[in-house]
Image: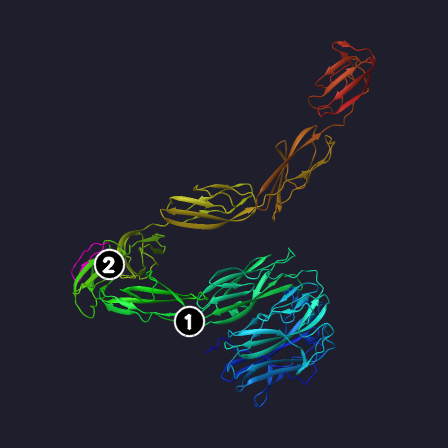
Amino acid sequence: MKKLITPLLIFVGFVFTQNIFASHIPGADIEFECVGPNQYIIRCMFFVKCPAGNSLPSYATRVVSATNTCGLPNQSWTLPCVECGIEVSQLCPPQLPQSACSNGGLPGVRMWKYQSSVVTLQPCDFWEFSTNICCRNTTVNVSGQPSFYTYTRMYSQTDPCNTSPKWTAQPIPYYCANQQVTHNWGIIEPNGHTIQYSFVDAQQAQNSPVPYNFGYSAVQPFGPSSTINPQTGEIGFNVGTIGDYIVAVKATEFNANNQIVSEQVHDVQFTIINCTNQLPQPPQGGITNVTGSGVLTPPNKITLCEGSATCFDLVFTDVDLGDSLFCTSNVTSVLLGSSFTFTGKNPVTATICWTAPPGSQGTYTFDVGANDGACPIPGLTSMGVVVEVTPGILVNLGPDILIPCNQMTTVVPQISGGSGGYSYLWSNGSTNPIIAVGPGTYWLEVTDTSGTACIGVDTIVITTDKPTADFIADNVCEGTPVSLQDASTPATSGTIINWQWDIDNNGSTDYVSQNVFHVFSGTGPQSIKFIVTDSYGCKDTIVKQVFVNPKPKAGFIGTSLCDGITIVFADTSSIVSGSIATWQWDVDNNGTFEYFTQNFSHGYPGAGIYNVTLIVTSDSGCVDSITMPVNVNVKPKTDFVTGQSCANDGMAFLDLTTPTPDGWKWDFGDGTANSPVQNPIHYYYNPGVYSVKLVTWIGPCYDSLTLIHTVRPVPIANFDAPAPPLRPETDIKFTDKSEGGNPGGILEEWYWTFNSEFFSNQQNPIKQFGQDDYEICLTVTNQFTCKAIVCKIIEVRYEFIIPNIITPNGDGMNDDFVVKALFGEGNKLTIYNRWGDKVYENESYKNDWGGTNGSRNLADGTYYYILITNLGEKYTGHVTILH
């Protein structure tokens, strides 16, 4: 009897009263699903070629009719749409928005699917479900645009609850012109039935074939290159004319008795387009790398016994070496429990593995496809695979056997299935059909020696009627005796007379009493071997474990043990295995438990030493305790003096902490290193507001204080003096160019000095000077009392005048060569006569040359001078001497 494994699908023909799909119907399907005796769900699916599908309304219902050959009433149903206008275009996902279904330039197809509620149909061979829709697309192989008619037949008298096959391949496929095409329909047959495939006439009405154009026919829908594999349904062709082609394939389903149970016409449209892309190639040698128990019949058939496993590969290639292939298959829906994987890119290897379960006898077909991902319209190819599952061998050794102690028994197997010619192999090495054995576990492997090579296996357990050893022992805590109590069951006859206890299962007997006590030296699981012997000498042994639970080790720490601060008590107890379940705390040694949590906080009334007791209990009830003193220390009170300072000035911080702490840690808030000095001096270089933190401590007790310290901006001192020359006894005005400092500085005071002597506190003072060099300094102060100073040198000189005649006659008038405004040391004067002879030279001239050459007066005449001042200025000219 066949089991109903998956729902039975019926795609039923529609009878439409509206001519709504004119010249845009490329395909439709009819399937049926059995959901119980004589009860079915009817489904119908059709396809519309875009852009016509874009403008269609929803068409929420469709009328479906069914006729029969048994004289039963014909029926019709109004089916609601369950999936309406779904796009199923053969495009890469990124290109779907560019299809004709979205008003784009790439080809597109939409799908409508309708489904009935449960309908009742009496048994009949056969029911025919049909649809007639107007109209088909214009195609290469059919004349005009005839109507669309297709049907599915259900033989419910032969099979009262059958499920029609389901077609899962690309609904309206696109293939390339002038390339060999291999197309598989992706059939899922849920009943394990056999399907035969054939080309049939596409019809425009019942029993009315469409008019094929010259050179084409039902069996040659693509012309002479058309082929079909009757076992897998795989079709092949190679055409050069682009356009649409109508193809009708009938799938005839046969049950195990070779009776027809359904006929289904799959009427679809293939579209042939021009391509630069080369289609992937199906496996040239068919199935390869078969492992396990599968037997290959080249190129694409695997034979497998029930209960056996196999794996095999299919390798797809592509002449476009840059293409990256990936594989798809419906195998996991056909061979339930199978696995499907693929590796590589080009070539790509698809690997299928399956174990045929008991009861899976039958023929299964599925397809494996390859997609080259060549967008926007990827290239496809596929290969159909046939898996035939043959009956296995059933071996039955009977129920397990109980025999008397030290006796033997005969095992006689019952075998069915296969050809009837068997070979035997027992687990003890015997090849006889029947064996006589004592207690033990035995398996028999039976092999069909006449063709199928299927193997059947069964196991039998033979045991003796002997006492059953057992004992009771409770788990204990470390160091506690454990009670070992005998709980053995004697055999049907006889009594237990001997007990042997091997406490550590090391082969040595430790006790011979029926019940004992024992203290284990270790913790954790302890293996105990217990042997009992009855009055017939029959023995039984049991090994059980007693768990010796470790005691916990109590421990804790207390943090922040400082007066006035809550102390956090943290449990540090440990245990080798298990966990600690409870905690009991006595924090002041008064015999009363105050806390019962693992960790807690407690505040003591003052400094001092307090004894704290912790008792911990593990989840197995084991206990440990600890008592430790807790020292509550005095805590310092941090304080210090701060205020404000000017940028670049040192700030002296004064510690006022009481009592005097053990250490200090200053954080000045400016990113510089911390200071451990009690009263540090710190320099801030940028104005701003800084958080100054002082941490102090006495022992483990810390305190901190953060105060704000303001750093004020320093002004920028600057002034301008009149451009040289600056003359003696004339007013010289100094103009302040200082700034108050950023941010927010305002100047309030000016202090002027020359050569360190104060001369004004005005912002822009005026002063007269004698001939000399002067250092002028300006000190400015802003509203924050922050100061800045700048100094500049000014030169005050008389006008520089060089005489062109001297009269060194001793009358005290114009006797010397006096250069007016000559000032200071380092002025070099050189005098030459008219012949270029040097007659005078002085490296530090003081306006004291009186027309002499040493002690001798020079004659009247014209002389030439070179004067180089101490400022590096060079003057040349002539001077006349007249006595």
Q: Disc count in the image?
A: 2
**Residue 581's spot in the image, x, y percent?**
31, 61
Of the residues tagged 1 and 2, which is closer to the observer? 1
Name above or below for residue 510 compared with residue 732. below
Residue under circle 2? 528
Name above or below for residue 613 compared with residue 74. above
Place residue 778 in its image quadrant: top right
**Residue 53's spot in the image, x, y percent?**
68, 75
Mark 1 surroundings: few (<14), some (14-19) or many (≥20) residues within 10 A: some
**Residue 225's spot in the image, x, y percent?**
68, 67
- Nearer the observer, 822 or 92: 92
Q: Which colour scheme is used?
A: rainbow
- Nearer the observer, 206 or 479: 206
Look at the image and say whether residue 512 sits in the magenta stretch. Answer: yes
Mark 2 surroundings: few (<14), some (14-19) or many (≥20) residues within 10 A: some
Q: What residue type is labelled 1?
A: Gly
* CA–CA distance in space, label 1 to label 2: 49 Å
In this orientation, does residue 881 appear?
no
